Amino acid sequence: MASPHSDMMTSQPSLMNSGKLEAVQTDHRKKIGSTRQKTCDPALGKLWKEKRRKEMKPSTKDQIEGKLHEMKGKVKEKAGQVTNNPDLETEGQVEKLAGKVQKKIGQIKEVFEK
């Protein structure tokens, strides 16, 4: 009995080592869900990714670092309040303010980059 996909199969002549022509079945069905083959070396892809990571705009970097300092400041401030440590609370407020300033500098740089 023929397979349900036999209408998608065609015969193509092929030369074997003995020199005789033999019919070879070739399947022309498309693979479902297959992804496109990458033509470049995986090492080159890794280098490209690293290059893109290193090429972060200074304005973006400032904004990210500012947000990080702002969050650290909030944590220190809350820890100072919970432990009743005014020095830690003040340190947190200062770091939070420094983070806000750095984030704002990044936003200003972004405006002037365009």
Image (cartoon, rainbow, N blue to C red):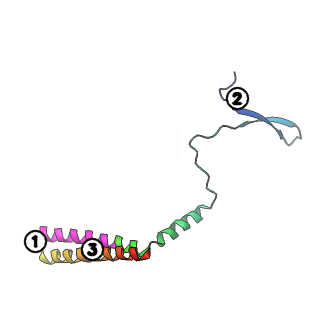
Look at the image and say whether residue 23 sits in the magenta stretch: no
| Amino acid at pointer 2 | Asp
Q: Main secondary structure of the magenta part?
A: helix
- Res 72 quadrant in image: bottom left
Residue bounds of the magenta highlight: 64-84
Q: Between residues 68 and 109, which one lies in front from this camera angle? A: 109
Q: Which residue has dot 2 on it? A: 7
User: Could you tell me which residue is drawn at 58 percent across and 48 percent down?
Assistant: 35
Q: Nearer the viewer, mark 2 or mark 1?
A: 2
User: Could you tell me which residue is drawn at 27 percent across and 74 percent down?
Assistant: 100
- Res 113 quadrant in image: bottom left
* Residue 103 image point, x, y percent: 31, 73
Q: How far separated are the C-alphas under marks 3 and 1?
A: 25 Å
Q: Residue furthest left?
A: 84
Label 3 element class = helix
| Amino acid at pointer 1 | Asn
Q: Which residue has dot 1 on it? A: 84
Look at the image and say whether residue 68 sits in the magenta stretch: yes
